[in-house]
Amino acid sequence: MSQKKSKRDELRQQHATNQLPILLIAGGVLLVGIVAFAVWQAAGGNSGPKVPVEVNGVPSIKIDKEKVDLGDVPLGQTVEVAFNISNVGNRQLRFTETPYIELVEGC
């Protein structure tokens, strides 16, 4: 009986050893697929909604709000404003300097 058990254990170990290269290859393929998907997403594969081109041959920036009046804001209260900034040109838009935003206090 111990020889049968030993033979069975030996076959199980050999079977597990034969599957190791297959598992390593499958894991490698899965890892390469995940990395490729991450690179595709970072490169703009799913970059969201596109805006219609309004200017040809150059980049052109369009901001949905130029001025926002928040009214009277008590000291210590936090307020938020959201802006949508789009490139409506058909060339890549690049900033060479930090964009300038001016906060003006009213009277």
Image (cartoon, rainbow, N blue to C red):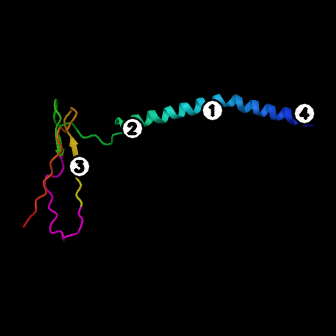
Instruction: Say if the magenta span includes residue 72.
Output: yes
State which mark lies toward you, 4 or 1: 4
Q: Residues within 10 Å of mark 1 (few under 14, many from 20)?
A: few
Residue under label 3? 84
Report, in whole angstroms, how far the alpha carbon at label 4 lies from the one at label 1: 30 Å
Q: Secondary structure at mark 4?
A: helix
Residue on which the image places disc 2: 41
Position above or below: 97 against 7? below
Q: Identify the amino acid type marked 4.
A: Gln
Q: Position of residue 89 (x, y in %)?
A: 19, 35
**Mark 4 or mark 1, earlier in chain:** 4
Q: Is residue 60 above or below residue 72?
A: above
Q: Residue at x 19, y 70 (%)?
A: 75
The answer to whether the residue labelled 4 contacts the one labelled 2, judged by CB atoms less than 8 Å apart, is no
Local crowd size for mark 3, using a 10 Å CA cut-off: few (<14), some (14–19), many (≥20):
few
Q: Please tell me which of labels 3 and 2 falls first in the chain.
A: 2
Residue type indicated by callout 2: Gln
Quick check: 28 above or below 105?
Answer: above
Q: Pointer 1: what residue?
A: 23
Q: Residues within 10 Å of mark 2 (few under 14, many from 20)?
A: few
Q: Nearer the viewer, mark 3 or mark 4?
A: 4
In the image, 104: left or right of 40?
left
Q: Quadrant of residue 9?
A: top right
Please state the horizontal and vertical placement of residue 87, each as a whole percent of the image: 21, 39
Q: Helix, strand, or loop for circle 2?
A: helix
